[in-house]
Amino acid sequence: MGGRIKKSILLIDDDPLVLNTVTRLLEKSGHIVSAFQNPKEAIQEAMMDDFDLVISDIRTPEVNGLQAIRYMREMRSQQGKDQIPEIFITGYAAEYGEDAQKLKPRAIVHKPFNLVDFIEVGTVLSR
């Protein structure tokens, strides 16, 4: 049902292996993925394009995923646009978990994750 609908997904992760693997899997599931290692570049892309879902690593250099999501939310609010559903991915749950929970994302997925389950979460939550 919902898995058949093509989604436009903004993906942010500074680990090239994770970025490439998740991108390939999402694309194989029929989604369009704009993938970025640098959150600043992802923010710029979010200002120019609309997405159905944002998936962001929490711990990224310079601007972390939490800061990037806060900025995107503020920017969209100022533009009168609806908020985009978000999923955080992290290998550092203890360090950032509480701050991530405060933002009330649709999901927080802990690394390492089962890729099939991850695709299921992304597909269901991006509707």
Image: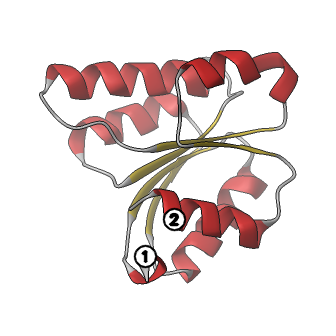
User: Which residue appears at 82% of the width and 56% of the height?
Assistant: 113
Local crowd size for mark 1, using a 10 Å CA cut-off: few (<14), some (14–19), many (≥20): few
Local crowd size for mark 2, using a 10 Å CA cut-off: few (<14), some (14–19), many (≥20): few
Location of residue 9 by image quarter: bottom left
Q: Nearer the viewer, residue 16 or 73?
A: 73
Location of residue 98 by image quarter: top right
Q: Position of residue 102 (x, y in %)?
A: 58, 18
Q: Are marks 2 and 1 in contact (CB under 8 Å)?
A: yes
Q: In the figure, is residue 44 to the left or right of 31? A: left
Farthest-out residue, left: 80
Q: Nearer the viewer, residue 37 or 126?
A: 126
Q: Position of residue 25 (x, y in %)?
A: 64, 73
**Which residue in the protein does label 2 denote?**
124
User: Which residue appears at 35% of the width and 55% of the height?
Assistant: 52
Q: Quadrant of the C terminus?
A: bottom left
The vertical placement of 34 against 124, above or below, is: above
**Which residue in the protein does label 1 denote?**
2
Q: Secondary structure at mark 2?
A: helix
Q: Position of residue 100 (x, y in %)?
A: 63, 24
User: Which residue appears at 33% of the width and 42% of the height?
Assistant: 45
Check disc 2 and give the amino acid type.
Val
Q: Quadrant of the N terminus?
A: bottom left
Q: In the figure, is residue 87 to the left or right of 69? A: right
Check disc 1 and give the amino acid type.
Gly
